[in-house]
Every structure is written in structure tokens, then in C-alpha cells.
Image (cartoon, rainbow, N blue to C red):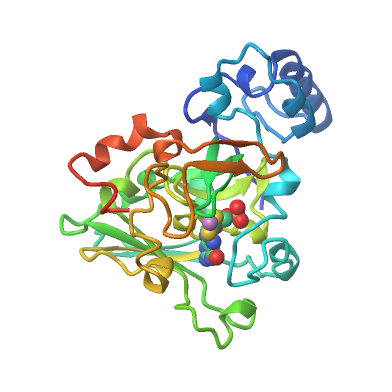
């Protein structure tokens, strides 16, 4: 599957020069252009972790450094994964998923929506060209990464399909195929994995239906061919290998909340002040570099999402 980049956007908006020092950025663009003959409008960011890591200007303010403008090395994001359908061991997912069939693949968008749709991934990407966004990702287990997703803002698709006025939530479902996903065989876990958002959360512009990572199609271990990305929530909300998205008037049951409701809430907003019952959420460790930093409320996206939760007690609605 080929990936078209419509435009590159960084969230929060920061100049590319802060991600990679300008001289390296420009020479790399020149280099990329010369080897792949990219058009002037297309930008491919490929991770170049060692250069990025060692060249962060010492003048960066602590605040900027905290927001972590350093991309996680590509190899780490692609070899340290959570994907229980394939393996419970993070370094075992990539191998266990390597033969996962992601073509053909159809996603269904249905329920309380005026124009339900079933569409193949290739057609979806043609209709809604993915854009590239660098987001922080924070797992509930206190590890974090910063990666460039390719994705379609989910709100564009949902708006086009016209949600019915009764719709209040979306429910997303992962493929159920025990022949391909060994973890689903004779499992105690409530497969297929499901996740959900309030509809107003789902319509926030940060939410992506991701088709790619580091300028190329998603690998199976990262949720190919289509996974959700909700950067202000703990990573388990970002459900992988989606086959169905339903609009509903009921808060959907979700995988982790069903397994252990006192540990994993429906909201799962990143919050340093609300500890997991078994560990603190105050700090996080970046995979790849092992750098430890303070966790930020809403994973640093408060400006974009805090208004969604005005009037909610975040320690009760965890
Ligand atoms: N279907 C499914 N989706 C899933 C998971 C899973 O086990 N199954 N793990 C979640 C968790 S806990 C995290 S942190 C992210 C990890 O995404 P990554 O492996 O691409 O970093 O995927 C989420 N999506
Ligand atoms: Mo996670």
C-alpha cells in the first residue's frame, strides 16, 4: 500500500527546527529528495535518533525539553510493543505478528450514523489522505515514546457520515481471529479487544485513525493496517487492528476496564496526580533512551482537551 502525505503537522505545533536542528533537517531533506525524488510538497520524516538525541541545543528551555521534541528511535517503537493478541511479552510481539494478514481489510463504520459505510483500507486512504503528526504516547505502565504517526483525523470521517443526534459514544473493535492471533485462543481475556470514547472526545482534532508510522505503512506489531491514536490518554485506549467503529448511545464496555475496573477507567486520561493502584504515575521513562521525566496532565495536550472535562472530577473519572 502506498502512503500519500497531504501535509505534515506537529502537535503541539512546534517548528521542525526544534525536532531536529535546522542544518541537519535541511541536509536530510536534500538527501531524501535526492534519493527518492520527493515532490516539494511532500515531507518524509524518518527517525534519525542518534543525531537528534545528541544534538538537542543546550539552550532549549526545560519546558521544551520536557515536551520531548526528541523522536523515539524507530527500532524501539517497532520492537517494544503491547499487543496481547500476539504476545504478552513486549519484545515478542513483532515476531509473533510478523505473518499477520492485513490485506484485504475492511473497516465498518455503523450504528447511530446516517450514512453507515464499509470500506477497504486502500479506498479509505484515497478518500482521506493521511497526514503526519508527531505525538507523545504514554502507556499506563509508565513508559513513553514520541513518534511520527501517519493518520486520518477521525472527525473528518465521522462528520461526513453524519452521526445521529442520539449518538453519544463510539465503540471500536479489534479483529477476532484466533487462527492468526494466538493470544485469543482459549483465553480468559474478553476478546475481541474493544475500546471506546465519548463522541465529543472522538471528534477532537487530535484523534487519529493511523495507517502508518515513520513515513511507512504500519507494521503488524503497531496495529496494522488501522489503529486508533488518542495521545492524551493512556496507550491502551489506542486500539489496534480495527475492524469496526460503532456509534452508540451507551458507554461501551472496554477490554481493560472489563478486566480490572479499579485499575483502568473508561476515561484513562494521562494524569500524574492519579496513581495506578499499584504504582505512581508521576514520572515516565522514555523507551530507547531510558530518560525519565515528569508525566504531564493530559500527556501535555491540556490546551487542546482540558475543556472536554470541565466539571468532571478526574480522580473519580479516572
Ligand atoms: N488490540 C489491541 N490494541 C492495543 C493493545 C492490545 O494489547 N491489543 N495494547 C494497547 C497498549 S497497552 C498500548 S501502550 C499500545 C501500544 O502501542 P505500540 O505497541 O504501537 O507502541 O497499544 C494499545 N492497543
Ligand atoms: Mo499500554
Please state the horizontal and vertical placement of residue 114, each as a whole percent of the image: 24, 59
Of the pair 225 and 72, the residue shown nearer to us: 72
Q: In the displayed structure, does residue 125 sit left or right of residue 170?
A: right
Residue at 58 percent of width and 30 percent of height: 68
> For residue 110, what is the image quadrant?
bottom left
Of the pair 296 and 224, the residue shown nearer to us: 296
Of the pair 275 and 11, the residue shown nearer to us: 275
Residue 166 in view here:
yes
Residue at 63 percent of width and 65 percent of height: 102
Please state the horizontal and vertical placement of residue 129, each as a whole percent of the image: 52, 42
Please state the horizontal and vertical placement of residue 60, each as a whole percent of the image: 60, 15
Q: Is residue 103 above or below residue 227?
A: below
Please state the horizontal and vertical placement of residue 261, each as a whole percent of the image: 35, 67
Of the pair 301 and 117, the residue shown nearer to us: 301
Residue 241 in view here:
no
- Which residue is outermost to the bottom? 186
Q: Is residue 264 above or below residue 273?
A: below
Residue at 72 percent of width and 66 percent of height: 92
Residue at 58 percent of width and 24 percent of height: 65
Amino acid at each position: 500500500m502506498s502512503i500519500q502525505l497531504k501535509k505534515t503537522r506537529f502537535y503541539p505545533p512546534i517548528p521542525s527546527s526544534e525536532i531536529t536542528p535546522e542544518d541537519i533537517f535541511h541536509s536530510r531533506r536534500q538527501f531524501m529528495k535526492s534519493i527518492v525524488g520527493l515532490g516539494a510538497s511532500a515531507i518524509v520524516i524518518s527517525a534519525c535518533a542518534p543525531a537528534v538525541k545528541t544534538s538537542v541545543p543546550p539552550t532549549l528551555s526545560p519546558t521544551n525539553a520536557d515536551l520531548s521534541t526528541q523522536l523515539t528511535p524507530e527500532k524501539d517503537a517497532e520492537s517494544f510493543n503491547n499487543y496481547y493478541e500476539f504476545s504478552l511479552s513486549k519484545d515478542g510481539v513483532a515476531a509473533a505478528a510478523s505473518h499477520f494478514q492485513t490485506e484485504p481489510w475492511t473497516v465498518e463504520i455503523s450504528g447511530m450514523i446516517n450514512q453507515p459505510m464499509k470500506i477497504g483500507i486502500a479506498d479509505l486512504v484515497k478518500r482521506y489522505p493521511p497526514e503526519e503528526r508527531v505525538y507523545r504516547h504514554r502507556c499506563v505502565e509508565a513508559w513513553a515514546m514520541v513518534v511520527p504517526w501517519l493518520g486520518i483525523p477521525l472527525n473528518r470521517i465521522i462528520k461526513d457520515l453524519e452521526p445521529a443526534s442520539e449518538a453519544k459514544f463510539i465503540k471500536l473493535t479489534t479483529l477476532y481471529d484466533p487462527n492468526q492471533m494466538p493470544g485469543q485462543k482459549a483465553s480468559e481475556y474478553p476478546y475481541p479487544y474493544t475500546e471506546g470514547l465519548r463522541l465529543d472526545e472522538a471528534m477532537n482534532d487530535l484523534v487519529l485513525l493511523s495507517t502508518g508510522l515513520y513515513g511507512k505503512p504500519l507494521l503488524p506489531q503497531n496495529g496494522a493496517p488501522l489503529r486508533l491514536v488518542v495521545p492524551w490518554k493512556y496507550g491502551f485506549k489506542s486500539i489496534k487492528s480495527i475492524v469496526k467503529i460503532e456509534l452508540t448511545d451507551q458507554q461501551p464496555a472496554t477490554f481493560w476496564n472489563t478486566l480490572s475496573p479499579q485499575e483502568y477507567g473508561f476515561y484513562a486520561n494521562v494524569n500524574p496526580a492519579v496513581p495506578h493502584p499499584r504504582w505512581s504515575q508521576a514520572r515516565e521513562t522514555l523507551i530507547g533512551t531510558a530518560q525519565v521525566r515528569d508525566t504531564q496532565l493530559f500527556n501535555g495536550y491540556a490546551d487542546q482537551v482540558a475543556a472536554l472535562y470541565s466539571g468532571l472530577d478526574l480522580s473519580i473519572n479516572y
